[in-house]
Image: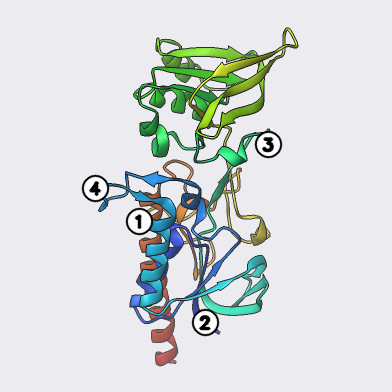
Amino acid sequence: MYKSVIIGTGPAGLTAAIYLARANLNPLIIEGPQPGGQLTTTTEVENFPGFPEGIMGPELMDNMRKQAERFGAEFRTGWVNSVELGGRPFKLDVEGIGRIETETLIISTGATAKYLGIPGEQENVGRGVSTCATCDGFFFRGKEIVVVGGGDSALEEAGFLTRFASKVTLVHRRAELRGSKIMQDRVRSNEKVEWALNRTPVEVVADDRGVKGLKVLNNETGEEELIEASGVFVAIGHHPNTGFLGGQITTDSNGYIMVQPGTSETNIPGVFACGDVQDTRYRQAITAAGSGCMAAMDCEKYIESLEHHAAVI
């Protein structure tokens, strides 16, 4: 029996772990097959406060983990298959560990960026392939970039990347974009943006120094074309890692956990959510860390209320 269990070891989960461990609550943190979350797939992080020279993503996550361990947090590796949240204590079925019981639960399982699934893509993540313009746009100053996608997210990223790139080519497999008209008009008016519509990405082309371009299929002519670029930004959306919850937690239509405004509280008392699993807008390391602090403080307050109630009885 644990007072608190945290699922996930990204910036949100690790920050929650630091706060709960310092409160002498000895949390258990369950880390999955990708400890550290999405930041472990990035290279240099330059927008996390406190590191004027930047810091490598894996190093930042390792430092946060060591900080949590210093204060007594326990880490175990496993995959949460299912949870039972209908009564207290909450029960977790964890592959590799077994059944775990806890008085409170913090969900910080994040959201996974959708990829194209084409050759050359995964092996070049961090070497020119990215899913976060805010994180990596700076590294492509003065270079040509490709953005893949046709929704508002892709249009927003294309517009943002024009601050750095000499040219941004937006690739979409259909002849028409899915994004809102106002976003389309805004991006079309930007002279740095070029369009490659009705083209399907086929392969990320790279050499030992990184990405060289994106090979696409022209759906009108049936011929393959190479769009030369130093970076390929995939902007086709994210999916939150909430499948294991079995519908017990209230989510929006896309599966993101809904929390009470200004808190980390879910629809089930004693269950809290933080990080990208409940963030459809910002999805930054620093906002995830901030929400992890909120979850830990909400959790600590909730545990205190349980103990006070038990003492009164």
Badge 1 is on which residue? 290
Q: Earlier in the sequence, mark 3 or mark 2?
A: 2
Secondary structure, mark 1, is helix
Secondary structure, mark 3, is loop
Q: Earlier in the sequence, mark 3 or mark 1?
A: 3
Residue 246 % position (x, y): 68, 60
Separation of marks 4 and 1 at Cα, in angstroms: 19 Å
- Residue in the picture at 51% in, 55% down: 37
* Label 1 crowd bin: few (<14), some (14–19), many (20+), radius 10 Å: some
The one of 242 and 196 positioned closer to us in this rendering:
196
Residue 241 in sight: yes
Residue 152 % position (x, y): 51, 27
Badge 2 is on which residue? 2
Separation of marks 3 and 1 at Cα, in angstroms: 32 Å
What type is the residue that disc 1 sits on? Gly
Using the image, determine if residue 287 lies above or below residue 95: above
Badge 4 is on which residue? 52
